[in-house]
Image: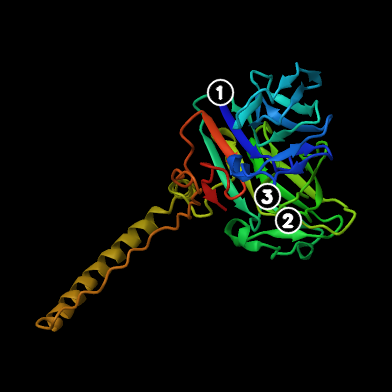
């Protein structure tokens, strides 16, 4: 069995907070840089709730254990767990596990943390695990698709999606789309077991809805206190083999906010990867094409052979006369230019060097971290 382990930051729209949560600020907390990527979301209101829905077999929520923190309670798939004391310490401990569970049945689960006191509770990042294949020897292929890929269709018209959104330099490859048009939506066709969508979150980020293969729609909000590029806007897994259709729709907001899309990442095993290939003919393609050609008449082949022999004799005579004429002259060596096939440019993640472009990752357990300043670690194989 092959597993995927994903990690998202606290600012991802996939993490839902009740209204009494706010972003942590370094001006208020001198130890803010101890959190993952210097970001955390906190509350000190009793009854404040944070929830996360995932498709997988396990989840772990990280935060801090500090003297000014208090009691909280976990609810998993509707069942309340025993209260946990997060403030019984004299030390400041960061990036620690607040709750962890594994061995769940593969499927949709919802985990929530509820603050029980007028003391602090904060969220740093969340990790979850999902299965992608029952075959442990099956390799995982991961492809990144820019917003300019033909897999994207922007509707009602492309003119409703601006090609130069604000802060364009923070987008992957300096390319992105944005809309403020009510009812604007995009369609994305892909083939794989899982898909991730990225874009910025910001104070003027808009709400949006996502549905896959005509299933129930889920609503999210890209409105956050601070601008954060390349955030995970949506993720779906356990989609099964074959082609899938994802629709993302801009939702009405009290004021005209902006929704922007950066890129998509598709995760697929060898058994369901058939469309993400090079547009150039491969050796296999050429051999198949050659094998499928009808055989030529024997008389035509003999005639062509005789003609080629005569042309070869004439060529040899002409070449001999030419070099006799050039004999004694100084020879000049021309530089050699070797034509090489276009192989594409692998995109290098910031933290870890990637494998060869187009090659599978070499394990049956894979870890991906969705951060603010980089695309997922280890997972960019082809930039399309």
In front of the other: 283 or 57: 57
User: Is mark 3 in CB contact (under 8 Å) with mark 1?
Assistant: no
Looking at the picture, how far across and down is residue 99, in whole percent? 67, 24
Q: Would you call the spot at circle 1 few (<14 residues within 10 Å), some (14-19), or many (20 or more)? A: few
Q: Check the image and name the residue furthest to the left.
A: 328
Q: How many marks?
A: 3
Circle 1 SS class: loop
Check disc 3 and report the residue beneath it: 27
Asked whether residue 380 is in view, the answer is yes
Judge left or right: residue 355 versus residue 23: left
Q: Secondary structure at mark 3?
A: loop
What residue occupies the far right of the structure in this picture?
254
Disc 3 or 1, which lies upstream in sequence?
1
Tell which tag, 2 or 3, sits nearer the viewer. Answer: 3
Q: Position of residue 326 (x, y in %)?
A: 15, 82
- Kindly check if marks 1 and 2 are in contact, taking CB atoms under 8 A apart as contact: no
Disc number at residue 1?
1
> Where residue 165 sits in the image (x, y, percent)?
71, 63
Q: Earlier in the sequence, mark 2 or mark 3?
A: 3
Q: Quadrant of residue 22?
A: top right
Q: Position of residue 186 (x, y in %)?
A: 76, 52
**Residue at label 2?**
260
């Amino acid at each position: 069995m092959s597993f995927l382990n994903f990690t998202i930051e606290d600012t991802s729209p996939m993490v839902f907070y009740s209204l009494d949560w706010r972003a942590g600020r370094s001006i208020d907390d001198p130890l803010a840089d101890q959190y993952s990527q210097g970001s955390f979301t906190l509350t000190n209101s009793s009854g404040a709730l944070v929830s996360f829905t995932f498709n997988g077999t396990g989840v772990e929520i990280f935060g801090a254990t500090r003297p000014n923190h208090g009691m909280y309670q976990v609810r998993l798939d509707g069942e309340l767990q025993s209260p946990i004391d997060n403030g019984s310490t004299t030390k400041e401990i960061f990036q620690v596990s607040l709750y962890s569970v594994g061995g769940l049945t593969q499927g949709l689960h919802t985990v929530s943390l509820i603050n029980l006191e007028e003391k602090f509770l904060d969220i740093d990042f969340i990790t979850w695990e999902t299965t992608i294949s029952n075959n442990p020897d099956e390799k995982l292929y991961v492809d990144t698709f820019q917003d300019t890929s033909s897999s994207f269709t922007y509707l009602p018209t492309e003119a409703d999606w601006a090609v130069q959104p604000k802060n364009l330099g923070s987008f992957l490859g300096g390319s992105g789309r944005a809309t403020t048009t009510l009812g604007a939506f995009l369609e994305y066709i892909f083939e794989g077991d899982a898909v991730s969508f990225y874009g910025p979150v910001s104070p003027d980020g808009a709400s949006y809805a996502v549905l896959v293969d005509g299933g129930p729609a889920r609503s999210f909000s890209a409105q956050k206190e601070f601008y954060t590029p390349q955030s995970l806007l949506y993720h779906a897994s356990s989609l099964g083999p074959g082609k899938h259709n994802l629709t993302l729709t801009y939702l009405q907001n009290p004021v005209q906010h902006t929704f922007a899309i950066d890129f998509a990442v598709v995760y697929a095993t060898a058994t369901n990867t058939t469309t993400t290939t090079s547009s150039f003919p491969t050796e296999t393609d050429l051999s198949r094409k050659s094998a499928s050609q009808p055989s030529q008449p024997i008389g035509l082949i003999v005639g062509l052979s005789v003609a080629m022999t005569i042309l070869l004799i004439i060529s040899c005579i002409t070449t001999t006369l030419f070099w006799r004429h050039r004999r004694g002259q100084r020879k000049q060596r021309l530089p050699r230019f070797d034509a090489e096939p276009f192989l594409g440019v692998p995109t290098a993640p910031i933290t870890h060097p990637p494998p060869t472009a187009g090659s599978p990752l070499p394990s049956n357990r894979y870890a991906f971290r969705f951060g603010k300043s980089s695309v997922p670690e280890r997972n960019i194989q082809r930039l399309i």
